[in-house]
Image (cartoon, grey):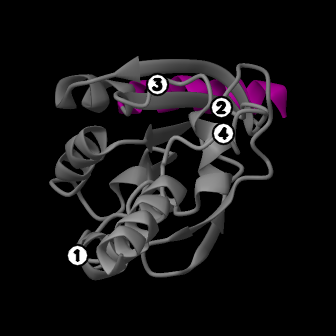
Amino acid sequence: MKNIILSLLLALTFIGCNSKSDENKNVEPKLVVGKSLTDLHLKDQFGKEHSLNADTYKIVFAFDKEPAHTCNDFFNTQKPNYLQEHHVQFVADVSAAPSLIRSLFIMPGLKDFKHIVLLLDDKATAAPYRKGIDTTKIVIVTLLNKKITNIKTITTTEQLKKAVAPVINKVMDSVNSITK
């Protein structure tokens, strides 16, 4: 009898921890061309809160482990202010990881990086950004005045390097000076 009760408790625990819950089905997607991201406020790996800078032209999103590793490996080989120089912010979604894994392994590992990693660390916060997006790829969101003008997905370091290329930023600088 004791084993049956223990088995039922374990089964209920695992059912309750199912990551495929329906609670986020009705969320409105945030990553849609034409939408504004002025309300994007996230903490970095050190707990400091950030919002979009007025001159942010791109946001690189990594929703899964593989894209996040590709991004972090590339950004970590660059100068510490590489992202700021290119008017880019990097957002990693760590919300799917169990809190114990996050606090023992992921967060200490992120603190070793010299670049800023903004974190989606709560499933409810991450859900609108994940909705309708291929989360297995790196997602590049292009902005103009904090409004999404383009969304594309990439997979390789070479594509990431081109997506954050300085030539794009020079073009955006000239567009911004015209619109002011």
- Along the line of sight, which residue is nearer the eye, 156 or 81? 156
**Dot 4 alpha-carbon crowd within 10 angstroms: few under 14, some 14 to 19, many 20 or more:** few
Residue range of the region highlighted in magenta in the rendering: 165-180
Is 173 part of what is drawn in magenta? yes
Q: Residue at x 56, y 79 (%)?
A: 48
Q: Nearer the viewer, mark 3 or mark 2?
A: 2
Q: Amino acid at mark 3?
A: Ile
**Dot 1 alpha-carbon crowd within 10 angstroms: few under 14, some 14 to 19, many 20 or more:** few
Residue behind mark 3: 168
Tell me the SS state at disc 2. strand
- Along the line of sight, which residue is nearer the eye, 21 or 66? 21
Residue behind mark 2: 143
Asked where in the image residue 37 lies, by quadrant, the reply is: top right
Q: Residue at x 36, y 75 (%)?
A: 1
Query: How far apart are labels 3 and 4 at the CA level?
Result: 39 Å
* Magenta segment, prevailing SS (helix, strand or loop): helix
Q: Amino acid at mark 1?
A: Asp
Query: How far apart are labels 1 and 2 at the CA level?
Result: 28 Å
The answer to whether residue 57 is visible is no
Query: How far apart are labels 4 and 1 at the CA level?
Result: 35 Å
Q: Amino acid at mark 4?
A: Asp
Is mark 2 in CB contact (under 8 Å) with mark 4?
no
Residue behind mark 4: 22
Q: Compared to 91, does 175 lie above or below?
A: above
The answer to whether residue 85 is visible is yes
In the image, 136: left or right of 73? right
Q: Which mark is residue 112?
A: 1
Q: Nearer the viewer, mark 4 or mark 1?
A: 4
